[in-house]
Amino acid sequence: MRKIFEPIIWMNQIFKKMIGKTVSYLEKSIRIQLIATFTFCTLLGVLVGWSSSSFFEDANKISIIDYASGMEAIDGQTQWLVGSITEEGKEINIQELLDQSNHQNQLKILIIDENGKVVYKTKGAPEEQINLHETMRNVMDFKMDQVRYVEAQNLIQDGTEQKRKEFTTFYPVTVNTKNMYIIASGIPQGNVKYIVNESSPFPSLLGFITFILSFFYITKRKMNQIEAMAEGVREFSKGNLQYKIKQAGQDEIGLLTSNINQMAEKLLANIEKEKQIEKQKSELITNVSHDLRTPLTSIMGYLRLLGDAKYENKEQHDEYIKIAFSKSEQLKMLIEDLFEYTKLTDENMALDSQEVCMNELLDQLIEELVPQAEEHNLSFVKEFQEDRIYAVVDSEKMVRVFENLLINAIKYSIEKREIKVSIQREERHIKVSIANHSEEFTKKELENLFERFYKKDQSRSRAVEGSGLGLAIAKSIVELHKGEIRAEYENGVIQFIILLPI
């Protein structure tokens, strides 16, 4: 049973696919939509015009009485009589035949010889002699003038039939080897017929109006989309780039609407980016001015004291020089960090990447910083995998990242604690973690750690000098490597996590 219906099911599936593809193509092509709309509206207009034509024809019909069939009946009866009279080998009573025709068709029938003398006639016919030539002329004139036996006086008016003309037909006939003529005349019976007086333009006009209205109605939705798109462009020209044009459909208009919205979004994003850049420039200038002015003011102050010899002894003199030198080094470090950060934020910055063993890189940095950690009663704990872990990085810049994080861990860690450094390979990246015990960090402080010139509130932490650009530089370097860096704080431990793609 299933095999019987398999072809039907198969054909149904093909038909559904064809319909689906057609609808999908129709939805995506405004050209096909216009062709389909024009075709549908044309067919609808033709249908309405054709349907209404019958109504207007009925309104313009007039009734007439057509005598053509009656005339044909008289003529046919006359021809039948001629055939019956001239039929060979058959004895026939001509008078009886004429009377029979008169009784059936109410015809006046005369048979005359060549001299016009009436030889046979139906009952009630008074003629005895006929002017043959005049009769023939009248019959011929009647046939030429009256192609159809329809005249105004034959119309039914006020329920009364007007007088009708008599129809006469004329044929030669041979009776007993003599040449004679048969003349039949009578009033033909009329049939009522209806004809259209004149064709009306209203069906064509109605069909045209139907086409216009249906085309306007169907295309109204597309016109609304175009108007909405124009309104959106006007809003964009006014600077309102947050305005969204409502997208409807998947055709070229819908695609154009989507592209315009995307263009506005990109313009808005670029403008916001420009504003952010300008804001960052302004903040950078403000922060740099502040951070440069502080050590510079100190240097100038101590140099002025030295220049004015406002010191009590040589020890104080040497102390002033030492402080001024320390401030100048701080100033130098700030300028170097600022220069480094500016280079890293350049879009054209290129990395000198090569395959590096991350275990060895971190191990070497830790060994170099062990003395500095011991000065603060700190120790390093390494949690490395036994296998070597390699990554394609710019080794010089990654050293800057790890060195900055390790030095920060030493600077800001609570003394007599451990600094844990771990590295491990995960499915899609290498994870490096540096954790140390520290004072509490709020969520907002963690979010701001990687901002330029951000320094934790020194009233709540140990006062340690720094440029405020170290973590911002570290973040820029990691992001240049398509990686991620973040800070987490939990149970008195702050942990910096770096994820580098494999």
Image (cartoon, rainbow, N blue to C red):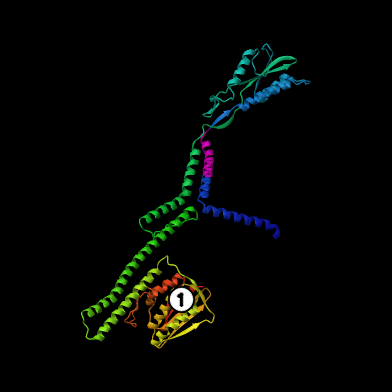
Please tell me how crowded label 1 is: few (under 14), some (14-19), or many (20+) other residues with Cα within 10 Å. Answer: many
Q: How many circles with numbers are drawn on the protein?
A: 1
* Residue 488: percent from left, percent from top: 43, 78
Which element type, helix, strand or loop, lies under badge 1? Answer: strand
Q: Quadrant of the N terminus?
A: bottom right
Q: Foreground: 410 or 214?
A: 410
Quick check: can you spot residue 393? Answer: yes
Q: Is residue 50 magenta?
A: yes
Name the residue rendered at 61%, 54% in the picture.
Answer: 15
Quick check: can you spot residue 130? Answer: no
* Residue 266: percent from left, percent from top: 42, 60
Where does the magenta region start and end?
42-61
* Residue 254: percent from left, percent from top: 47, 55
Q: Foreground: 287 or 20?
A: 287
Q: Is residue 234 above or below residue 410?
A: above
Name the residue rendered at 30%, 78% in the picture.
Answer: 327
Answer left or right for 277 relative to 391.
Answer: left
Which residue ends up furthest to the front in the rendered image?
314
Give the amino acid at mark 1: Ile
Res 190 → quadrant: top right
Q: Is residue 232 magenta?
A: no
Q: Foreground: 374 or 322?
A: 322
**Which residue is labeled 1 in the image?**
498
Answer left or right for 144 relative to 319.
Answer: right
Q: Main secondary structure of the magenta part?
A: helix
Answer left or right for 160 relative to 280.
Answer: right
Q: Foreground: 174 or 427?
A: 427
Which residue ends up furthest to the top in the rendered image?
115
Answer left or right for 248 relative to 86.
Answer: left
* Residue 137: percent from left, percent from top: 61, 15
Q: Is residue 245 above or below residue 436?
A: above
